[in-house]
Image (tube, rainbow, N blue to C red):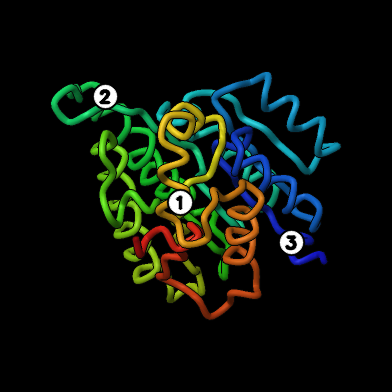
């Protein structure tokens, strides 16, 4: 398939498990890419694995930094504007409410929510008509999550923010949807999954954890023209865990 031929897609957190899987899938389907990650070395390795050329740009740095956000926008402009945007950069810290600090709360919301708003706002002028935005919520945003109040709050807010984007940008043909992964074992979640993974899998109707590739497939669908009449939707990619 080449659903993304002549399309430019921006992915933040691109060197993480889901981001890297998405980058590989979109590249295989012909996409031009703007890839961001905090880890410069991991981003360079991703570039190499994608056999990246002049139509793949990368930006390394803290996604909450306005200069990094501006560099992402400039890279997207150089590639002809944005046809797809998938802000996958995120943080998942474990802290019971009684131990959760204001600093941890602010850090989580700064990365998971504030940076998504800030970069979306800056990309608006370079979003092409009929572009697609896919954000990342979580099953935690629907049902809460012990030890992750800050994460759950940020992800619940992402869904509402995304639906508002769908309402405000629909007149340009721009679609905005969110995916809500369940237990996906990646570098970001490895610590918590190691501690609680068996119990979480037992709560999941499919009886297992999901993969980065399964999540990336759902994101790619929503970014593509196959989902041309879908907007304002939260797609649960969690093996039915949201029902448990």
Left or right: where 78 falls relative to 68? right
In x, y percent, where is residue 106? 25, 29
Say whether residue 53 is visible: no
Q: CA distance from mark 2 to mark 3?
A: 38 Å
Circle 1 residues within 10 Å: few <14, some 14–19, many ≥20: many
**Mark 1 or mark 3, which is nearer the start of the sequence?**
3
**Mark 3 or mark 2, which is nearer the start of the sequence?**
3
Which labelled disc corresponds to residue 54? none
Outermost residue, bottom direction?
A: 229
For label 1, the SS is: loop
In x, y percent, where is residue 95? 27, 26
Residue pointed to by mark 3:
4
Left or right: where 166 falls relative to 173? left
Circle 2 residues within 10 Å: few <14, some 14–19, many ≥20: some
Q: Which residue is located at x 26 percent, y 49 percent?
A: 144
Which labelled disc corresponds to residue 182? 1
Say whether residue 107 is visible: yes
Q: Which dot, 2 or 1, sits closer to the camera?
A: 1
In this view, the residue in front, 142 or 115, is: 142
Q: Quadrant of the N terminus?
A: bottom right
Discs 2, 1 touching: Cβ within 8 Å = no
Q: Which residue is located at x 35 percent, y 68 percent?
A: 168
Q: Quadrant of the C terminus?
A: bottom left
Residue pointed to by mark 2:
104
In this view, the residue in front, 52 or 105, is: 105
């Amino acid at each position: 398939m080449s659903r993304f031929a002549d399309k430019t897609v921006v992915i933040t957190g691109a060197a993480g498990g889901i981001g890297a899987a998405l980058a590989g899938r979109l590249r295989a389907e012909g996409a031009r890419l703007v890839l961001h990650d905090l880890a410069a070395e991991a981003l360079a390795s991703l570039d190499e694995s994608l056999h990246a050329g002049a139509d793949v740009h990368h930006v390394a740095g803290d996604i909450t930094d306005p200069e990094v956000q501006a560099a992402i926008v400039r890279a997207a402009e150089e590639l002809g504007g944005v046809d797809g945007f998938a802000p996958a950069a995120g943080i998942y810290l474990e802290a019971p409410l009684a131990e959760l600090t204001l600093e941890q709360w602010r850090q989580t919301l700064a990365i998971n929510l504030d940076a998504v708003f800030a970069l979306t706002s800056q990309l608006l002028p370079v979003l092409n008509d009929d572009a697609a935005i896919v954000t990342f919520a979580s099953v935690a945003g629907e049902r809460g999550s012990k030890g992750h109040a800050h994460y759950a709050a940020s992800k619940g807010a992402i869904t509402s923010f995304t639906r508002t984007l769908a309402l405000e940008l629909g007149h340009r043909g721009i679609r905005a949807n969110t995916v809500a992964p369940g237990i996906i074992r990646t570098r970001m979640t490895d610590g918590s999954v190691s501690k609680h993974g068996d119990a979480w899998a037992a709560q999941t109707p499919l009886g297992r954890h999901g993969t980065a590739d399964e999540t990336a497939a759902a994101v790619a669908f929503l970014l593509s023209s196959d989902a041309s009449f879908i907007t304002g939707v939260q797609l649960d990619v969690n093996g039915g865990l949201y029902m448990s």
